[in-house]
Amino acid sequence: MWYNLGECADSDDHCVRTALFLWSVTAIVRNDSTSLTWLIVSPQHQPLFDDVSRFDEGRSPMNLGRILIVEDDFDAAEVLGAYLNRDHFQTQHAADGHRALVLHAQWRPDLILLDIMLPALNGNEVLGAIRQHAATPVIMVTAVASQSSRINSLLYGADDYVTKPYNPGEVVARVHAVLRRWRGNGSLARLPRLRHGDLILDRDAALASIEREGNEQPLDLTRTEFSLLAMLMASPARMFPRAELLAGCMPESGALERVVDAHVYNLRRKLERAGVRDVVVTARGMGYRFRNPA
């Protein structure tokens, strides 16, 4: 299928720029993107982009990552997809929870934008299923704005939370922010390998693990949980106010300080399941610290 966005005179650069903008903002690529072709006409009537499927192969310099949009509102999904495509992200769309899990397993996205109110499985159920075997960053995008819903999603392992109605540009900015944290470009990127008893944290490898009989068994932590643990372990016995932990681990989230409590609760639960207890200590009314090394 070809779309002619208009003819441009030889000297009319504005027309070409307008065509490029319209293509990047309004050309929505469906899940079967390889079947669609887009034509933007140059002054000589030659296509500037002749096959959008070229942008679906691998992670080229013009591809900043794969974003899975899980949203049953097709119009909203198309708008988010357009904004993400404009910023050089690949996108796939799932309209229900079951399809989201299939695409997560097959397509291996770098980040998921996940609605809560979905047919079949709801967003928190999808998130819980993913967190059983993967730490893929997840931003909840939903009309459910209650504080309890936000905290429940964070307890399930969400990395950020955006409520509707939203500015699509803000959602894209949050995607960039979460991926920067995930890829280790933040202030904690050069932490050394840390250890407390059997608990080992290697920031360069982005891995926390438990040593058992000479073997290191990885812990399944979200990016935010890993950042919290790294920040606390790097300065044992120092008390960190919630605001400082929030700024260090979720700098662009805009979340309330109490959201830190939800992430710490989840981190403690995972550490306790691995046999590591009482290492994240609450400073009542102030914040948290890591237990003094023995």
Image (cartoon, rainbow, N blue to C red):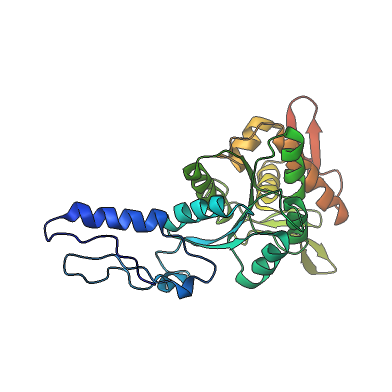
Residue drawn 25% across the image and 54% down it? 17
Q: Quadrant of residue 67?
A: bottom right
Whether residue 200 is situated above or below residue 170 in the rendered picture: below
Q: Is residue 257 shown left or right of residue 26?
A: right
Whether residue 98 is situated above or below residue 151 in the rendered picture: below
Viewer-closest of 25 and 191: 25
Q: Position of residue 40 (x, y in %)?
A: 29, 65
Count numbered badges in the picture: 0
Viewer-closest of 18 and 112: 18
Q: Position of residue 257 (x, y in %)?
A: 67, 31
Viewer-closest of 120 and 124: 120
Residue at the extreme top: 285
Q: Is residue 46 shown left or right of residue 185?
A: left
Viewer-closest of 57 and 143: 143
Q: Quadrant of the N terminus?
A: bottom left
Residue drawn 40% across the image and 53% down it? 25
Residue at the extreme left: 11
Q: Position of residue 136 (x, y in %)?
A: 65, 59
Q: Quadrant of residue 49?
A: bottom left
Q: Position of residue 183 (x, y in %)?
A: 55, 56
Q: Quadrant of the C terminus?
A: top right
Whether residue 7 is situated above or below residue 186 in the rendered picture: below
Say whether residue 57 is visible. Answer: no
Say whether residue 159 is visible. Answer: yes
Whether residue 290 is situated above or below residue 184 in the rendered picture: above
Residue drawn 22% across the image and 54% down it? 15
Q: Is residue 26 shown left or right of residue 158?
A: left
